[in-house]
Amino acid sequence: MLKLHDVIKTYAGKSEVTALAGINLTVTAGEMVAIMGPSGSGKSTLLNLLGGLDVPTSGQVVVGGKDLARESEKGRSLFRRSKVSYIFQAYHLMPTLKVSQNVALPLHLAGVPAVEITRKVAQVLKEVGLEGRANHLPDELSGGERQRVAIARALVTDAPLLLADEPTGNLDTARGEEILNLLRAIHRERGTTIVIVTHDHNAASVCERLIKLRDGRVEGDGSPVGGGR
């Protein structure tokens, strides 16, 4: 599913900064993987490369058989639309749109017929336990509910790859645990490949595999404590 070969990413400036310093990594389809490391270790850069939001300075980033490093910006945009979805720490919901409208946005952008949009939105809202919140605005929801809306929006396109950037970072322990249980259920029932960037050891523990980064390199790759719970 995902393969990085000798990936280097540098940023120019007054002095060149190396975010990734030769990453070699393979994630098979259907894995649930956590990526951890201190600030500046390259976690967010790696996630951006996997999602086609950025390209490496050198090396290969192969996702679903496509080398994103060789794709044009338009090609990567089309890839993101159909093959990858995101969950962010800050939810990124449109405050003036109702829950159902927020979830439907990716389908409207993809030109999906209205009848199909209605069906799929109802399906994913039920999947995340928010079928009774479809007509609420984001500021009428709790933090945990907002994150569930964000997860529903990520699921509605049926993308095979789900990238989550600190999905529990804005939540208290109880709500964070609910979100992690939901992600684990999605992984189990849908078989979606999930990559979670996190500082939270509890979040890492629900994954089957933990990749540790330090100074732009893979420092460790194995099973987290309590992996897969």
Image (tube, rainbow, N blue to C red):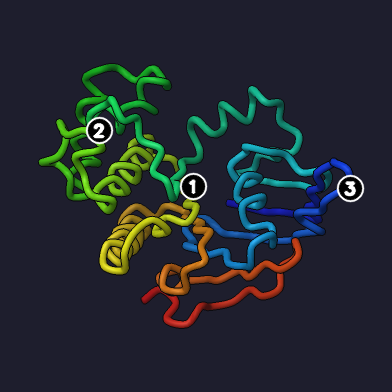
> Horizontal placement of 116 versus 72: left or right?
left
Q: Amino acid at mark 1?
A: Leu
Question: Mark 2, residues whose alpha carbon is within 10 Å: few (<14), some, or many (≥20)?
Answer: many
Q: Residue at x 25, y 37 (%)?
A: 138
Task: Look at mark 3 in the image and give the residue it sits on.
Answer: 15
Labels 1 & 3 near each other (Cβ < 8 A): no
> Horizontal placement of 45 versus 176: left or right?
right
Q: Callout 3: helix, strand or loop?
A: loop
* Observer-nearest of 61 and 144: 144
Task: Look at mark 1 in the image and give the residue it sits on.
Answer: 161
Q: How much space separates mark 2 and mark 3, taking CA atoms? A: 48 Å
> Horizontal placement of 114 versus 212: left or right?
left
Q: Which mark is residue 198?
A: none
Q: Residue at x 30, y 64 (%)?
A: 181
Question: Mark 3, residues whose alpha carbon is within 10 Å: few (<14), some, or many (≥20)?
Answer: few
Q: How much space separates mark 1 and mark 2, taking CA atoms? A: 18 Å
Q: Earlier in the sequence, mark 2 or mark 3?
A: 3
Q: Position of residue 226 (x, y in %)?
A: 42, 81
Q: Is residue 165 above or below residue 133?
A: below
Q: Residue at x 50, y 38 (%)?
A: 83
Q: Nearer the viewer, mark 1 or mark 3?
A: 3
Q: Position of residue 114 (x, y in %)?
A: 25, 17
Q: Earlier in the sequence, mark 1 or mark 3?
A: 3
Q: Amino acid at mark 2?
A: Lys
Q: Residue at x 24, y 49 (%)?
A: 145
Q: Position of residue 116 (x, y in %)?
A: 25, 24
Q: Callout 2: helix, strand or loop?
A: helix
Q: Position of residue 139 (x, y in %)?
A: 24, 38
Task: Look at mark 2 in the image and give the residue it sits on.
Answer: 120
Q: Amino acid at mark 3?
A: Ser
Q: Quadrant of the C terminus?
A: bottom left
